[in-house]
Amino acid sequence: MGATATQIRTDRPGTVRAGRPRLTRSVWAQMWRERWMYLFILPGFLYFVVFRYLPLLGNVAAFQDYSPYLGFSGSAWVGLTNFVNLFTDPDVAIALKNTLVISLLQIVFAFPAPILLALLLNSIMSGRVRRFVQSVVYLPHFIGWVILISLWQEILGGAGLVNQLLQSFGAGPIDWMSNPETFKLLVVAQVIWKEIGWGTIIFLAAITQIDPQLYEAAVVDGANAWRRIWHVTLPGIVNVIVLLLILRLGSVLTVGFEQILLQQPAVGADAAQVLDTFVYYRGVLGGDWGLSTTVGLVKGLIGTVLVIGANRLAKRAGTGGVF
């Protein structure tokens, strides 16, 4: 008797209150109709669950004096002791300093290198020359770090090819591979040599998506090659550059493990100890699993904050960002 008009409307079939179950049923019905497409997603979904998300539970070791023989349930809880040790351990400070220097050098020199190569290849008119250069620069990506470091040792080592040439001209030998002062620049040069060709794939693909009429209009306006690159090509791929830079910031504290580990004995820990090798030496070899897990946890948190912050800045600057 006392029901209002609003109550009467919400009690009718098909109103908002009755629509939620229908929406849920429609989603499940749609997923069932597209079940074979979702089946293709299942292997990737299981991969991330098993190898990416379940291992996150192991971060509990950062709050324990973890022992592999006792397991997570039997190891003693130590609270924030590992975090205190992380910020007071002098070895962590050395590893963090080396990591940040190498990471900064990689962002400044290694990150723009594929962009410059892609612009250069795009400006080459001969398709045969372009394909030859692409094939040559792609090959180092498929060479393992062990073989690559051995090649560099044969070229720049104490008895390498470069020193043999220097000695033939009467100059003294220079062992580039064991010099702590030039080690970080050497690491960045190796990364550029190995990955520059592979990195150009994405930027060349982005360049091909630029409307050719923009280049034709630029030519009609009298723009030379540099002007076309500056006003057409770079604005056309700026979203891809920002996207990859944001993703690179997520791994700013990860500068490579195998490459550094292979060369660390020659230059010493003061020059070549980074966070990745610190985790290996202190955790796997030294048995301090709690501190090593803390280092990995802090690395992940810093990377997440940098990605979210850079993504917001990119959106405010007018680019698409990552998400």
Image (cartoon, rainbow, N blue to C red):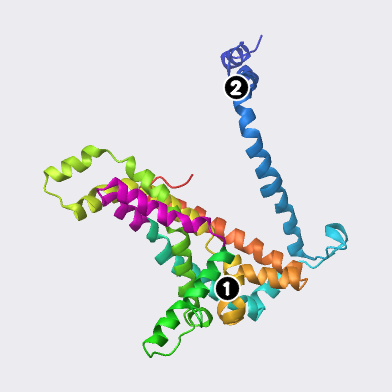
Q: Which mark is residue 96?
A: 1
> Where, by quadrant of the figure, is residue 207 drawn?
top left
Say what secondary structure mark 1 lies in: helix
Residue drawn at x 60%, y 71% is 262
**Residue that extends furthest to the front in the rendered view of this protein:** 168
Residue found at x 47% / y 46%: 322
Q: Position of residue 13 (x, y in %)?
A: 62, 11
Q: Quick check: is 132 in the magenta stretch?
A: yes
Location of the N terminus (image quadrant):
top right
**Depicted 48 relative to depicted 302: above or below:** above
Q: Could you tell me residue 223's position as x and y percent?
A: 15, 50
For label 1, count other residues whose C-alpha is less than 10 Å away and answer few (under 14), some (14-19) or many (20+).
some
User: Sequence-wise, which precedes: disc 2 or disc 1?
Assistant: 2
State the separation of the CA atoms marked 2 and 1. Answer: 49 Å
The residue closer to the viewer here, 94 or 109, is 109
Decide: few, some or many residues near mark 2? Use Cα within 10 Å; few <14, some 14-19, many ≥20. few
Q: At which x and y percent is residue 288?
A: 76, 71
In the current view of this chain or complex, which residue is farthest to the top? 1
Classify mark 2: helix, strand or loop: loop
Q: Nearer the viewer, mark 2 or mark 1?
A: 2
Question: What residue would you read off at disc 2?
Answer: 34
Q: Of the residues shown, which amino acid type is indicated by label 2?
A: Glu
Q: Does the segment drawn in magenta span residue 250?
A: no
Q: Main secondary structure of the magenta part?
A: helix
Decide: is 274 above or below 90.
above
Please give the name of the residue rendered at 73% of the width and 64% of the height, measured from the top-left corner: 62
* Residue 254 visible, this orientation: no
Question: In the image, 25: left or right of 78?
Answer: left
Q: Is residue 316 visible?
A: yes
In the rendering, which numbered label is found on residue 281? none
The image shows residue 111 at horizontal and vertical percentages of 42, 60
Start-end of magenta stretch: 115-144
